[in-house]
Amino acid sequence: KKYFQSKARSDGGLVHRVTPREDGCFTVKFKQEEDALRVCKKSSHVMSDATLTVTPLFFFELGDNCNGIYDVSKHSVPLPSVLIMENVDDHFENFLKQSNPVVEQLNLELKKKHAKVVFDEKTQMECLLDPAPL
């Protein structure tokens, strides 16, 4: 919120609220429409060494409860590839391979993070997110 309220940093103005969205983006609602337009016109936004992608989000007469329309192509996040875990303790790995209840519990916890552990030739983590667009 502070970043978008700083005219010097973002070219913004007074912010009404910042709301996280289910798709991992954030909605920033400005008190004045011209502040939002000015922020969107700025070519580069960097906050805490991270480059932000800023695009306008349009709402219709349905109000703030609708999803709105924005440029989805600018807000895509690449999915991580399979993570092969190296230097796993052999005793620990053998224990996991032989203990289905422990692996099930581990995968229940990993599912909250959209991942699962797979024991193949090497122990690996897989991303469970669907790469198909929503």
Image (cartoon, helix red, strand yellow):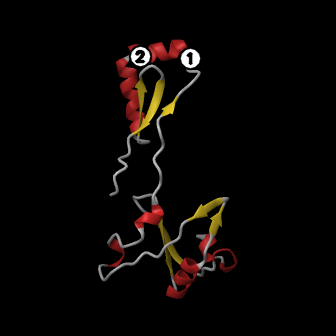
Image quarter of residue 53: bottom right
Residue 73 vs residue 52, the one in the foreground: 73
Residue at x 51%, y 16% (from the top left corner): 92
Label 2 neighbour load within 10 Å: few <14, some 14-19, many 20+: some
Q: Mark 2 points at which residue?
A: 97
Q: Do the residues labelled 1 and 2 touch (CB within 8 Å)?
A: no
Any part of residue 20 in sight: no
- x, y percent for residue 80: 48, 43
Provide the secondary structure element on which disc 1 rests: loop
| 56 sits left or right of 46 in the view | left
| 34 sits left or right of 76 in the view | right
Q: Mark 1 points at which residue?
A: 89
Provide the secondary structure element on which disc 2 rests: helix
Residue 44 vs residue 11, the one in the foreground: 44
Residue 68 vs residue 63, the one in the foreground: 68
- x, y percent for residue 132: 34, 52
Vertical relation: 71 (above or below) 106: below
Q: Give the number of callouts.
A: 2
